[in-house]
Image: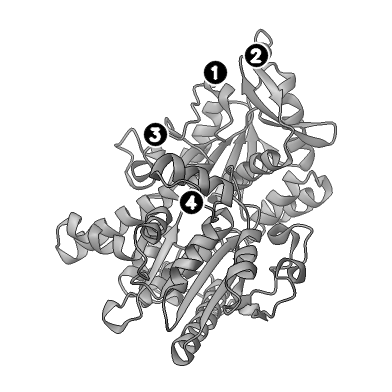
Amino acid sequence: MIPKDTDITAITWINSRYRPTPTIIEAAQALYQNHDVKEISRNDAGAENLENTNAAINYVIEDCKANNKKAICFITGVPGAGKTLAGLNIANTRHKFEENDHAVFLSGNGPLVQVLQEALARDDSKKNGIPKNKAKTKTKAFIQIIHRFRDLAVESEEPPIEKVAIFDEAQRAWDLQQLSSFMERKKGVPEYNKSEPESLIEYMDRHEDWATIVCLVGGGQEINTGEGGIMDWFEALNTHFSDWNIYLSDKMTDSEYVGDASIEELLCNRQYNIIPELHLSVSMRSFRSEKQSAFVKALLDCDIKCANEIYIELSEKYPIVITRDLETAKNWVRTKSRGSERYGIMATSAAERLRTRGIWATNDIKPVKWFLEGKDDVDSSFHLEVTATEFAVQGLEIDYGIVAWDGDVRYEKGDFVYKRFSRNMWCNVNKPERRKYMKNAYRVLLTRSRQGMVIYVPEGNPYDVTTAPELYDSTYNYLKEIGIAEI
C-alpha cells in the first residue's frame, strides 16, 4: 500500500493493482482456484478477521482428529462479514477424500447453492478446458443443498463420507414440526420426530472416531415458517449429544442470536468454550461502508435518531436515496453502475400490490440467470424486469439495488405494522413469529447492495383502496425523516 503522504505519479497509478472487494461468487471462484482469503479481500481488517476465524476452526478440527473428539462450532458475524466465505474456504481447503478429511459446505438456500455451483463450474470449465457437466459434478461434491445430505441420513444407517460439515445459515434450520411434516408429505416417512439440527448432528455422530460441525449463524435472518433459530441446535445438543464439545463466539449471547434467553439456560449449564475469533465483526460486502447493517437495524427498529446519525456518516461513502418514481430508480442504478457491476430490483415475497407498478414479486425466478447472465439476457438482473425476493437473494449480493417497498410492512404512528394481502384487502398479521419473518425480509433486501441502493416507495392510487396513497405516504415520510436524500 502506498503511504498517504507519498506523491503518486501517473506511471505508478497505471501500474498499481486494482483490488475491489469481490462478490461472494467471485470470492468462491478464487478459492476454488486455490487462492488464499487474503488475496481475495480488499479489506485488510476483513481479511485478517477471516484468517483468524479460519485458524480457530482449523485448530478445533485438528484437535478432534488427533484426540478422537467430536465438536460443534458456531460462527457469528455481521451481515456481509464473510460467514459464507469462511465456510467455503474451510470446505475447499479440506476437500480431500483420500486423506479421510473430506469437508462439505451445506446450505438450505437453494438459489445460493445453484448460483455457486454454476459459477464454479463455468469458471472451472473455462480455465481448465473440461466439459461443464464434469466440472459441475466436482462442485457438487463439496457444495450441496442441505436437504439431500439430510435425506441420505434417513436412507442409510452408515455415517457420511464427510468428517467436516459446514452448515450455512444454521439459524434457518427447520424445527421438529416443519421437518416432520415435510418428511411425511414428501418422503413418505411417518412420525419423523427429529428437528433438522438433531437429524444433522445424529448423522455426523455416526462416525466412531471424530467429526466436526461448523454452524454459520446470521442474526435476524430467519425469513420462513419453521425456521427454528439457533435454539433448536442447543436443544438437540442437550438432549442427545452430551459428549460433543461446544465452541461459541463471544457474541452468541447477543439478543439477535438467542433472544431474551441466556446461553446457560439454553445449554442447561453444560460446559462450553468461548472463542472470540469465531465472530466476524468486519463487514466486507460493502467496501464503501461497514455501517450499512447498523443503519438498516436502526431503520427497522424505528430508531430515527440513530438511523439519521449513521446515515450522515454512511452516505459519504455509500449512497442511499429514495424516490417515488420507478423509472427514476432504474436510471439511478444504471448510471451508478460501471463496467460489469451488477444491479437489479428486489421486493419482498409479500409485496403483492407492487404489480400495479409492473413489479411482480415472485419466487419463481431463475437465480442462475439473474445473478450470472449479462445485459443481453432478459432474465438477468440487469434488465430490471425480473424482481428477486428475499428467498432468491439471501446470501448473495449485487452492486446497486432497487428495493421496492410495498404496503406489507408500513410505518404508522412511530412503529411498523405488518399486513398480508388476501381476498382483495390488506389484513393484519398478528403472530409475532410471522412479523419477525416479514421484518427480516426487509433486513435481507436492504443489506444486499454492496455499493449503494435506492428505495422506491410508490405514490399510491387514490382510486384503488388496496394501493391508496396513505398506505405508502407514512413510510416514505419516515424515510425522509431519517434524512435519506430524495431523487
According to the image, label 1 marks what residue? 356
Q: Secondary structure at mark 2?
A: loop
* Rendered view: 17 above or below 225: below
Q: How is the image coloured?
A: one colour
Q: What is the three-letter code of the residue carrying label 3?
A: His
Of 471 and 191, nearer the camera is: 191
What is the residue that sits farthest to the top in this orientation? 463
For residue 461, which numbered disc appears in the image? 2
> Spatial distance from mark 4 to mark 2, Cα to Cα?
32 Å
Q: Is residue 68 left or right of residue 15?
A: right
Is residue 361 visible to the viewer in this orientation of the structure?
Answer: yes
**Residue that mark 4 sits on:** 397
| Residue 40 in sight from this viewpoint | no
Residue 75 location in percent, x, y?
58, 70
Type of the residue with mark 2: Asn
* Mark 1 vs mark 2, CA separation in Å: 9 Å
- Label 2 Cα neighbours within 10 Å, binned few <14 / some 14-19 / many ≥20: some
Q: Position of residue 456 (x, y in %)?
A: 61, 32
